[in-house]
Image (cartoon, rainbow, N blue to C red):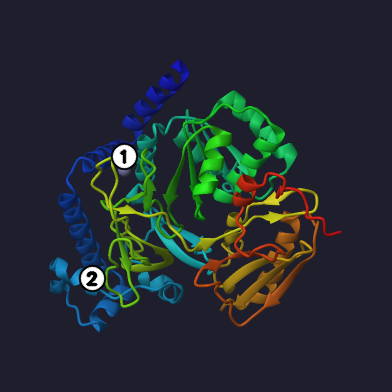
Amino acid sequence: VIAVAARRRVFDAKVAMLRRSHVAEFRRLQSNERLDPEAVGELTRSGALAIARYAFAASPFYRERFAAAGFSSSDLDDPGVLTNLPITEKADLRENYERVQTAEATPRNAIPQATGGSTGQPLRVMHDLRSQSHLLSWRMYQWWGVHPADAQALLWRPFNTPGTWRARGQALFAWPARTLRLNANHLDEPDMVAFLEQWERARPRLLTGYVGAVLELGRFLQESGRPITSPVAISVTAAPVTAAQKAFLHEVFGAPVFECYQCMEMPMIAGECGEGDGLHAFSDRRWLEILDDNGSPAAPGETGSVVLTDLRNRAFPLIRYRLGDRASWKTDGCRCGRPFPVLNPIGGRISDNLHLPSGLTVAGESMVSLFNAWPDAVRQFQLVQHVDQSLTLRCVRGSDPRADQIMSDVVDRLVGIVGGEVPVRLEVVEAIAHDRGKSRFILREEAGPPLDLPGQAASSSPSTSRNRPAATS
Ligand SMILES: [Zn+2]
């Protein structure tokens, strides 16, 4: 306990000394929590108008869009116009990557990001480094009793190769916090055992990861009967988590599970507070709308399409951007009394893990990044695991002239990730169908019911272990 307190003090002192602007922004974020809902609504509207005015002046894409819709810059002083501004679709970003950027999109201010878009439709955006989105996660951690200096365990795909300057920079920024990592692309018994041994030395207070990967580790704990020092909180992201899965994780890890909503286009959109009763939209920094099929605001409880505006990205403005997720507002808010509007758990994304004959598991959600280095190579892709465990990578060819070579290289990479255990086929198709309105980015063909999600199987019948191969051969 003393070590935890000392580490927090060292970290706070370091941030106060090196990052004055972060301290100021964090104080603002904390004071926003104490505003009333009307005042937060006013912050959202004034922030949205400010970024819309800026985009009209500085982004060729938005100037043309807004002008074509009949808006002049003086119209953008009236909050009433906000809900009439045109919607930005994924295809708009894909086709206008350069024209969305403003003069502030310099290497010093902004960093390009490629994304699978959570639905297997690659596109490029830019993050504004000045928006300090990590402070939104720090505020959320506080809701859970976690401090940014606390040790964390992370189940994610590999990023920032150790030894690179970027990795060193991040480690320095995080010091003296420690992050244990487990590669979500390679979940087998030796790696999980080694990770759990590190865990007992570092005793992380927060476990963060893809739902699929955290469930896999939970199942391993349950089956092996290994004891574990409980964290304070578990944070899952990327795919929805069911109530049964949450209960299962709470039981095996001994800590509550909190959902966090984010995407590569816009980090930190919403997150649960300690009450764990819906996700608070971070509406002091993002404007989140839920629209019905006519484009009108959905009534509380009514499911609609998520449309987002980043109030802080001046390098690559995202204004009324349709993310492709479906969500609904909670009808009865949250007991905690924080002034941010509350969402029901997010639906719409479905992902499943890949399971290989040796028992190796690959977290499906991490596969969404397969084409990140070549976002123009495919318009959409989907990974299918057949009953015999072999894989098919389905792609809709994109505009990159080297698309065929890149698709074939990605197949080779996949063969490497699955350790050559099963064949990987490439199938170039014209379109990829949605499954009952849900984007299914990993599709596992199974003899069982099609919506047999991991965790439901684990909590209802522990004998149907997913990290062992099905008896097919
Ligand atoms: Zn709350």
- CA gap, disc 1 and disc 2: 32 Å
Specify few, some or many for label 1: CA neighbours under 10 Å numbering under 14, 14-19, or 20 or more.
Answer: some
Residue 139 picture location, percent across and down: 34, 39
Write down the residue under mark 2. Answer: 83
Secondary structure under tag 2 reads: helix
Residue 184 left/right relative to 188: left
Give whichever of discs 1 and 2 has the lower sequence position.
Answer: 1
Q: Amino acid at mark 1?
A: His
Which residue sits at x=49%, y=72%? 437
Res. 8 visible in picture:
yes
Q: Nearer the viewer, residue 337 or 192?
A: 337
Residue 242 left/right relative to 340: right
Residue 441 left/right relative to 288: right
Q: Quadrant of residue 28?
A: top left
Q: Are marks 1 and 2 in contact (CB under 8 Å)?
A: no
Q: Nearer the viewer, residue 164 or 380?
A: 380
The numbered disc on residue 22 is 1
Residue 133 picture location, percent across and down: 36, 48
Residue 259 picture location, percent across and down: 44, 47
Disc 1 C-beta below 8 A from ligand 1: no
Regarding ligand 1, which quadrant of the image does it lie in? top left
Query: Residue placed farthest to the front in the image?
Result: 460
Q: Nearer the viewer, residue 220 or 464?
A: 464
User: Mark 1 or 2, which is nearer the eye?
Assistant: 2
Q: Quadrant of residue 286?
A: bottom left
Specify few, some or many for label 2: CA neighbours under 10 Å numbering under 14, 14-19, or 20 or more.
Answer: few
Secondary structure under tag 1 reads: helix
